[in-house]
């Protein structure tokens, strides 16, 4: 396991853990962990190697994850009826919005398909951020989330997708 510690040496949120284990073609393993710091400061990474053979080498690589889409009406994300859009839940509280232009009387069906290590909720909101369709979605056979909407008025609406509490990863709407 990979553990993140704060400046005081105490482990941070126990929900912060390796979210993906990849078996590489050469038989080695890659553990991936996503961490969102609430405050600036020093953090420490610990690795529990009690389950590996003595003498096993490992490499630590870090990268800065940048949110792909804003979670409000300033988003650069756009989706149109009949198309798809891809995004990433960079952390377990990530919310991404996608603008969608609808005409009065138009009916749309929205689906959220998340990867093996991610899941989420999907809803439709107006420009003020008010939910037009809450979390009353249906779940498909492969874990997809579906909802339907009949636009009463023409305008720009927003598809909001939100990560669940302990998952990160890619999704498609």
Image (tube, rainbow, N blue to C red):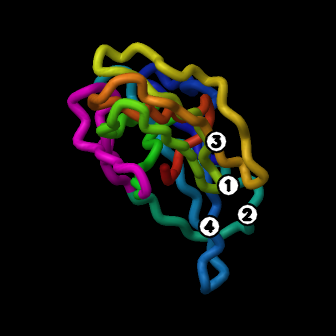
Report x, y in % for residue 77: 29, 44
Residues marked 1 and 2 touching at CB (< 8 Å):
yes
Residue hosting label 3 = 145
Q: Quadrant of residue 69?
A: top left
Neighbour class for label 2 at 10 Å: few (<14), some, many (≥20)? few
Q: CA distance from mark 4 to mark 3?
A: 26 Å
Q: Residue 32 is drawn in which quadrant?
A: bottom right
What is the x, y in percent for residue 57? Answer: 56, 70
Q: Which tag, 1 or 4, sits closer to the chain's start?
A: 4
Magenta span dominant secondary structure: loop
Query: Which residue was labeled with disc 2?
Result: 52
Q: Is residue 155 left or right of residue 148?
A: left
Which region shows up in magenta?
62-82
Residue 160, percent from left and from top:
44, 32
Disc 4 target residue: 22
Q: Residue at x 57, y 46 (%)?
A: 111
Which of the two marks, 4 or 3, is nearer to us in this view? Answer: 3
Crowd tier of the residue under label 4, counting other residues whose Cα lies within 10 Å: few below 14, some 14–19, many 20 or above: few
**Mark nearer the viewer, 2 or 4:** 4
**Secondary structure under badge 1?**
loop
> Residue 99's x, y, as percent?
30, 37
Q: Is residue 8 visible?
A: yes
Please name whichever residue, 13 or 11, is drawn nearer the observer in this view of the structure. 13
Q: Secondary structure at mark 3?
A: strand
Q: Which residue is mark 1?
A: 49
User: In whole angstroms, how far apart are the C-alphas of marks 1 and 4?
Assistant: 17 Å
């Amino acid at each position: 396991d990979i553990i993140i510690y704060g400046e005081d040496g105490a482990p941070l949120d126990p929900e912060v853990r390796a979210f993906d284990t990849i078996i590489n073609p050469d038989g080695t393993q890659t553990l991936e962990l996503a961490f969102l710091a609430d405050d600036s400061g020093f953090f420490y990474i610990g690795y529990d190697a009690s389950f590996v053979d003595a003498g096993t080498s490992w490499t630590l690589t870090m990268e800065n994850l940048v949110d792909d889409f804003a979670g409000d009406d300033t988003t650069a994300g756009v989706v149109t009826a009949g198309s798809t859009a891809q995004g990433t839940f960079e952390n377990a509280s990530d919310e991404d919005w996608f603008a969608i232009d609808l005409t009065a009387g138009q009916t749309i069906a929205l689906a959220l398909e998340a990867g093996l290590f991610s899941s989420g909720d999907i809803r439709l909101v107006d420009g003020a951020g008010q939910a037009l369709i809450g979390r009353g979605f249906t779940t498909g056979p492969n874990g997809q989330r579906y909802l339907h909407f009949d636009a009463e008025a023409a305008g720009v609406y927003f598809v909001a997708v939100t990560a669940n509490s302990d998952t990160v990863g890619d999704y498609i709407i």
